[in-house]
Image (spheres, rainbow, N blue to C red):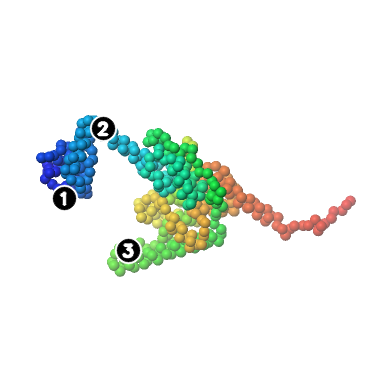
Amino acid sequence: MAQKKKLADVVAQTIKARPTPYEIRDTGNGSVKGLLLRVQPSGHATYYVELARGVREKIGPKEITLTAARTRASILIGEAAANGAHSFKGKRERKRREQAATLEGYLDGMFQDHAKDIADFNNTVKRVKNSFSDLLKKPMPGITELDLRRWDKARKEKVTVATRRRELKALRAILNRAISDKVIDGHQIARFSIKAETGDDHGQRKLRFLTAEEEVRLRAALDKREADLRDDRGRGNAWRQARRYELMPEFGPDDFAGHLKPMVLLSLLTGLRRGDVFGLKWEHVDLERRQIRKVIEKSSHARRKAGRPSVLAVLPLSAEAHQILEQCYRQRDPESELVFPSPKTGTRLNNTKKGFAAVLESAEITDFRWHDLRHSFASRLVAAGADLNTVRELMTHSDISMTLIYAHLTEQHTAQAVDQAFPASRIVHIRDAPQADAG
């Protein structure tokens, strides 16, 4: 509601904030009709000029002088008289579209509407922003091949060829989406490619899985982390008790002190990807039937892209995995549908890198990622005699070709089976064999 007080009667810098926004109109000698100062509850105030009903143009903050605000308002009123007040609406719309047409503006704006169609959407946006930070403020149609050659030259010092190609693919997909959204008419990087050079790191990595000795050390490191968390809780409660503060709940003898141990072991025992562990809900867990029934996030995204419906994966739980989830259920947060809600926000977890890295360091395990727990699960299946199609089903691979990376493990297993069935100790040399009668 406009106040009756005149701008000429107040010093703009000394105005007081109120619980709701209010406006002070410019009236009296030397005033400019339509000029006003809008004051927010925060105390922030801004000069505007009203050019027509529903058409206002921003002039500047309260710190500029009233004389300067009146001069600028008079100029804008003259432009509105010459070109029509509604031409300012067109300018604002063009400015809004120009801002949206920058890579950053599009990622933070209209691109958010596509979150439901993109697996790992938030991490995708974060990776693009980190990788192409120098291009974020640039209009998308203005991103050139020269920009990308400069980016590639700097980026190659940090990541592999394969990683840079994935980042470029993500950027190109975003620009193509912007064309579909009619934010831009086109872009200049459709034909740009990253060519490998001699000496480039191609990121080729051996299949990594836990050895039996490494698994023993990993489990010991997880137990040590649990013991440290319990000790921290005890010391914290002693400190609180001395100051008569409310105590934190004590851990029961079978309780998990943190999420990391059950999450790591569940990945190892089920082959679930980290994202699926983060997103695991109690509605996905059937403790009575000893199953996890869940639409796998990566597979679901691939099927949606192919125009096929999502499929519910049914994963049997081993005795240890079942025991872990039973304990998690006893400790569950009744306010959360997630099996592993963030202890800080209660929402879905999105990062365990620091804790997992510390556990690996404690266990003296190197060159190992969370995803390698999944490879370890598959290697254990093969060692137990599972055929590749069974491995495919339990790994929730959409295509058997994805499972073939474990084929060499099967070959090792079958070779061992042959050696066990026909041991070297039973070799009979031809010269030692009994000779048959010639007749």
Q: Residue at x 37, y 55 (%)?
A: 343
Distance from Cα at disc 1 to Cα at disc 3: 47 Å
Real-space Cα distance between discs 2 and 3? 64 Å
Please tell me whether mark 3 sits on a helix, a strand or a loop: loop
- Name which residue lies at 22% across and 48% down: 44
Q: Quadrant of the N terminus?
A: top left
Give residue 425's position: percent from left, percent from top: 72, 60
What amino acid is labelled 3 in the image? Answer: Leu
Which residue is tagged 1? 14
Q: Is residue 66 visible?
A: yes
Mark 1 falls on what kind of element? helix
| Residue at 31% over, 38% down | 96
Q: Which residue is mark 2?
A: 87
Which residue in the protein does label 3 denote? 247
Q: CA distance from mark 1 to mark 2?
A: 34 Å
Q: Nearer the viewer, mark 2 or mark 3?
A: 2
